[in-house]
Each structure stands twice: as structure tokens, then as C-alpha cells.
Image (tube, coloured by chain):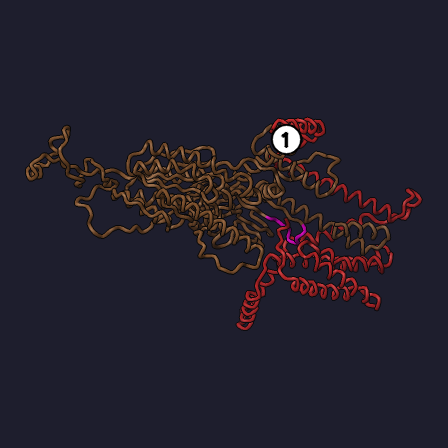
Chain colours: A red, B brown
Amino acid sequence: MNPLPAPTSVILRILHALGLFCVVLFIMDLVLPSSLELSVFLYLAAGLALAATSLFWSSWWGVVLVVPILLYLLRWEPRQGLQSGMLDDVFVTGLVMLFLVLHSRLTVDSLFQKRTWKQVRQRVRDDIQTLNEGQLNLRAMIRDGIGMIDLAGIRCVSSIAIAFAIMLLVPEDPTSVTRLRLTPGGLRAISIGIALGGVVFIFSTIIRAIGWRRLSPSESRIYLRSEAISSLFVELRSVWKRRIKSRQKRKP
Amino acid sequence: MVLGFLGSIVGILRGQDRLALISLSILCWLFLEWIWFRWRIDIQLPQLKCCRKVNGSAKESGVLWTNRGYEVVLEITGSRGLSAIARIEDMLAENFEFVDGANSIFVTHNETSVKLTYTCQPRGVGTATLPGVAIYLTDPCGMFWHRHFLSCQQTFQVLTTFVDVDEIHPVNKRVNALPPPGIHRLQRAGMGSELLELREYVPGDPPKSIAWKVSARRDQLMTIQYESEVPVRTTLFIDSSISTRIGGFGARLFDQLAFTAASIARSALSSRDPVGMVLFDEHGSRRIESGQGERHFYRLLKEMTAISNRGGPPSASINNDMIDLAWQVASDQYPQWLSPSVNRVPFTWFPILPHSIRKWHRRFRLAAFLSELYNLELQSTLELALDDGRFATYIQKFLIDSGYAWLEPAIDRRGRGFHDCIAKLTPLKEAITKAVARGHDNELFVILIDLIDCTNEISTLIPAIRTALARHHRVAVICPTPDFRRPDSKNLSAELPAEERELLLRAEQLRLNEAADRLRRRLSQIGVPVTFAADQKSIRMVLAEADLARNGRVTHTRGRR
């Protein structure tokens, strides 16, 4: 069961999704060169994603918002080496990731802190009053903003740095065709895949080991019980079925 | 993750580095979030500690009263604190009704301790358990979630409440000397202080009983006789058969009966009259000797609570509703025991359909869970998974132990032999006969029984009641109704309802009215007052009978109430 509370109104869902896609369009217009076909593509993508978000609100759908960007890059990004526009790529990646993290975080926050219209109105009134009285505490506002990003922001920046480092450390090898009969892209994909797979394997093994070590005696007994039965399941099942049948026959 | 994975591969293969970088960043981000989330699950959650105080007491067991509000304060602390975002919910058993406050809270910022305060009240007699706290953990971006159960079990015995009914006492003075509390007049010859009669002397009468002045006036020996002074014992015969224990807490017939019995016992004990109890069901009866005082009163209440928790009906065949309920309860209270990584299901070729596969997996996991919970043998897991009857028995046991009442649709109220009247009335008949044999004169027998569906079998009980009446005891019958209302044809409107459900309800009401009328007629023929719906009016009727017994009069009350 997902602990995230579901929103109450469909209209609210659609309004929320519309607002978000305005932001997406704005970012994409900033980042990407504008043209007629691009605009058509953007609006189509936005429409599709809007429908998706309206349908699948209760589950996490932040990545759905990135689909239009990735599709666009897949279709229109020129094939070029990393060295050609390194900083531009990092900037765009940072922007997309920031949007993704912020959007996910705000969605979760808004779902957890559901407010009634009355509460929202009161909050706005209080804010206006604070502004009028000149008691606006900028430092507190910034602290709250940073607090909201906290570790999630750090993890986001780290992930960009790691991805960038991987791309830099595993460059395309032009000699791969002659040496290994592999395209440079293919060799690079395999190398990165092996490296990432190794890291994931090590971490998951450690975490699984920690998890197993923390099992309670009862959980361990249930595991042993179910494993023991699984190994002899076919034989035991036939024996027990026969026993149950004979027991039922004995009953009047 | 799929998006990031595909984007990375395509981007790297096609040399589209911007696409590859964004996708790879998404993958790395998901991985880092997962690592951090797992750290919270494996390191942060196990160090959390829970302390709950119910009415200021943190003890693991205690006593509560039905329909009284209790303040619950729950505090969760941890050396490493609890990081956002989480929802904490104190799980309430079925017997608890939420009254005020909030039993769940969202943790949106990192906290070292979380406190919850709310008010709840027990609904019905029995056991109420507060099993623990459910912690729903999610990462700040809402991608992963985990449910953790923090055990913090407190078990309470729930005793029934009672009311002090205003008794109507006569204002005129009817006795010359007030007897001590708990002692009442009986119009039989005895050693009391009130005059019973003057009669002619019979050889063998003690000389000190001769009324000399009257003898002189009449010129023949006359003997003076005084009334007896006896205690008025009240014996409560309480029906604890399965038909009275089906339904949700607070809505069972047994809850009505316990409330009425407790109120009558309280009233009798406050007059210092001894009160005894006989609890009977289909399998027999259990007698609690009559006694006096607060301690005895609490003993009676605890006996009623104990009988309310006792076993259930014969094992019914298993159905999906029962399995679903058991699965839900087990997932709430023992989520780790049902985890697929711990509780493995053996591979089978059949069933093939996804729905059937899911059902089989659930059943096997529940079987393994139940056999571990009840410490059964290894092979019992398979037996439970394959044998419907045994599985149903253990599921019922588990539900009872988890504080669930016998509920529809798990158990049908009608049509499965839960109204085995002969089986129920036979122990009652024997119990009344024994009580008459053991008792003295002038006792009050209050029979609290679900008789509505037993009007045809009432003749089984009549001889025992006649015996009690012949021995100058008073008998009153209280019969609870499922809807807490008195059956009365005046309550029904002349117009027929349009909706099907309303029609069915009306038909049921008509059936109840007819059955109640028959019962009333049958019992009033032998001079036994009967009342329906266990409420204050019924208690007053019993107290009126008790009052008559205390005054030593022999006038019968009217049978129709």
C-alpha cells in the first residue's frame, strides 16, 4: 500500500498537471532552439504527459515529465562527441534534474500537507500581513527553502557529477572496431554497463546481507519452514492430499 | 528506471551524449535515493522505540470500561531520530472506537521524537488490544515506500459499564423495625421481629411463644408467630451461546445482556443482597456462587468478559472473505513475516491464471505464518495450505486472538445452526433446576437469554420455570433484540416501503414482532414477566420484582411488559 495520500478532486489533479506543464514548456523553450516542428512536438508531448499525470497521480510519475525532453533529444540531438559541448550538456542535465527533484519533492509535500481552501486563504492573509508590517524574514525563508531541498538536492548534484565522471572516464574508443569488432558506442555501453552493474551488485549484496543479519528468530524460522517445504513440496503434497481425502471419507 | 536505462543505452550507442548524460544522471539519482532509503529502513527504523500511555498508564495490560473515553499518548523516539517523510499510525483494534484527536501523523521534517495524542473508547465487552504502530516510510521524492510495524502491544480487559437505575421506594412506613441491610421480610414463620399471625396452640410449640394476654382473653392457649428475615438472592442466568456473540463489538446481543446483568447486579449488591451468576451456552453451564461486596461484583464482570472472549462456532468452510480479513490483519501486524523474501512459496505448474496464483501464494504464506505463530509442526504448514477445514479453524482462532469479533460475512448469523435452541435450553433447564434445589425461599431468578428465535422450543424450559415458581421464587426473563428496539407493531407504518432493502427489514421486523408476541403470551400464561430489548426499562422491571421479593409479598407482576 502506497503511503502517499491520494488527492480528492480530479479538477485539482488536472489544474496541478497543467501548472507543471507550463513550467516544462517554459524550461524547454529556454533550453532548446524553437521551431515550428519543435512547438508541435512539445505541445503533443505535453498533452500526452498531461493525460498520463491525470490518470496516474497516486503513484510516482516525475519521470513521465522527462519523457518529452528525452524523446526530443532522441529525435533531434546531433550525434557528436562529449568534448564538443561539455558545459552545455551539464547545464541542461542540471536543469532537467533540478526540475525533476523539485517537482517530485513538491508533489510529495503537497500530498502530505493537504490544506483546505480556508487554510490556504488564511495562510495568504498572514503572509500579506507580514509583508505589510515589514516583518518579512528573508533569512528564515531561505533557510526553509534550503531545508526543503536538503539531502535530496545533494544527492541530485552527486548523481550528475557521477554520471559526468563516468562519461568522461569511459570515452569512446575509435579502435574498438578493429580490435574487438564492436562499434565505439557498443564498447562504451558494455564498459559502462559492467562498471555500473558491478557497483549495483556490490551495494545490493551488502544491503541484502545487512537485511538478512537483522532477521528476527521467527522470521528465520518461517524462511526455513517455507524453504524446507518447497524442497519436498511435490511429495508432501501428494501425501497430504491423500490423507485429507481419507479423513473426509471417514466423516459421515 | 526503465526510462533512464533505455535512454542511457540508446544515447551511448548513438553517440548522443546529452541524452546519455541525462539518462545516466537519472539512473544514478535513483540508485543514490535507493541506497539512502535502504539505510533508513535497515539502520534508522530498528532503533525506534515506542511508548504508549493509556489513561496515564504504560503497563502492558489493564482494565477498561465500555463506552468510556480514554486518552492515549503515544511517543516514538530514536537515537538517530526519524527522518522525513513518514506517516505514523497507531493501530486501533476493532474493539476501539476513535473519539477525538488523531491516531496518525505525517512527519515532514526530521524529528528526534514524535508524539500523538488521541481519545478512544472500547465498544464492547471482551479484550481490546493495541498491537503497535505502523510506520509508512517514503523517500522525499515519493519513489520508494516501505511499511514497518513497531510492536508496542498493550492488552486490556474490557468490562461492561452499568447504570444506577432510580428505584421507586414507597414513602409510607410499612414495617415497625428496619431490618439490617441485606435482610428482608418473608411471610413465613420464622425468627423475625414482625408479627405474622396468632394461632391456636399446638402441642409441641415452645412455651415462650404463647401469647398469654390473648390466651387469657380468649380462654384458650394461643401461639404467636413472627415473620422470617431472609436475604433475597439474585441469580442471573446469562446466555453466552454463539448466537449472542456474533456481530461487531458493541452490537452483539451479549453486550446488551452484559450491560443489563451488570446493572442488576450493581443494584442488588448496593442493597447488600447476594448475587450469583450462571453462564450457559450450547455446551453446558458454569455457576458462580452468590456473594456480596465490590470484589464479588468485579468477579462477575470479569467472568462475563472472559466468556465473551471464549472460543467460537464450529469451524465453517473457508471463504475468500475470511482469508482476505486474515491476510489484512496479518499484513498489518506481522508484515515482516509475510514478506516474499522470507516467506517463500514453492513453485507449482498449477494454477495458471494470475488471480489463482495470487490466491495460492496468499494461502501458502498465511499457512506458514499461522503455523509459526501457533508453533505448529513443520508439516502443518502444508496441511493448513491444503485442508480447508483446518485452515478455517486456525484463521478463526487468529482473528479472535487479534481482537476481532465474529463478523459477517466471515460467519453467517442464520442458517448454520447457530440457533440450536434445544442445545442451549437444556443446560439452562438443568441450571435452573439445580438453582432451585440449592436455593432457599424467595430468590430472584433473572434469565437473560436470546429467545426470539426459540419460541417453538420454549416448552423445554417451562417445567423448570414452573418448579421455581412453585418454590416461591420469582422469575423474570429479559430477551435482547438485534436492533436494540422493543418489538412493537405500532412502530410499523401502514404503508409498504418501496425499496427492496426496506421491505426486507420490514419483513424481519414483522417476524420479530410475531415471535415476541408468542413468547410473551406463552410466558405470561405461567406468570413470568418478560421484557424485550435489554435497556433501563428492563432493569426497572427486574428491580420491581426484586422489590416485591424483598417485601415478602406474594403478588405476581403482570406478565405483559
Q: Residue at x 17, y 44 (%)?
A: B177
Q: In the rendered view, does A249 fall on the left or right side of B90?
A: right
Between B168 and B487, the one lying in front of the other is B487
Residue B449 pos. (x, y %): 43, 42
User: Which chain does the residue under circle 1 lie in?
Assistant: B
- Residue visible at 63% across and 29% down in the picture: A248
Q: Is residue B265 left or right of residue A135?
A: left
B219 relative position to A214: left or right: left
Quadrant of residue B287 within the rendered picture: top left
Badge 1 is on which residue? B383
* Residue B247 image offset from top left, x and y in percent: 51, 45
Vertical order, B79 against B202 (above or below): below
Picture coordinates of residue B63, whole percent (x, y): 42, 42
What is the count of numbered marks? 1
State the image quarter where residue B441 is shown. Answer: top left
> Quadrant of residue B328 in the image?
top right
Q: What's under tag 1, amino acid-wise?
A: Glu
- Magenta-highlighted residues: B136-143
Check disc 1: other Cα within 10 Å, few if <14, some if 14-19, many if 20+.
many
Note whether residue B505 is visible. Answer: yes
Q: Residue furthest right?
A: A178
- Residue pictured at 54% horizontal, 73% vertical: A132
Tag 1, which secondary structure? helix
Note whether residue B120 is visible. Answer: no
Q: Position of residue B25 (x, y in %)?
A: 75, 52
Task: Name the dominant secondary structure of the magenta segment.
Answer: loop
Q: Is residue B419 above or below residue B169?
A: above
Q: Is residue B137 magenta?
A: yes
In the image, B12 versus B186, the foreground residue is B186
In the foreground, B88 or B97:
B97
Query: Is residue B368 rendered magenta in the image?
Result: no
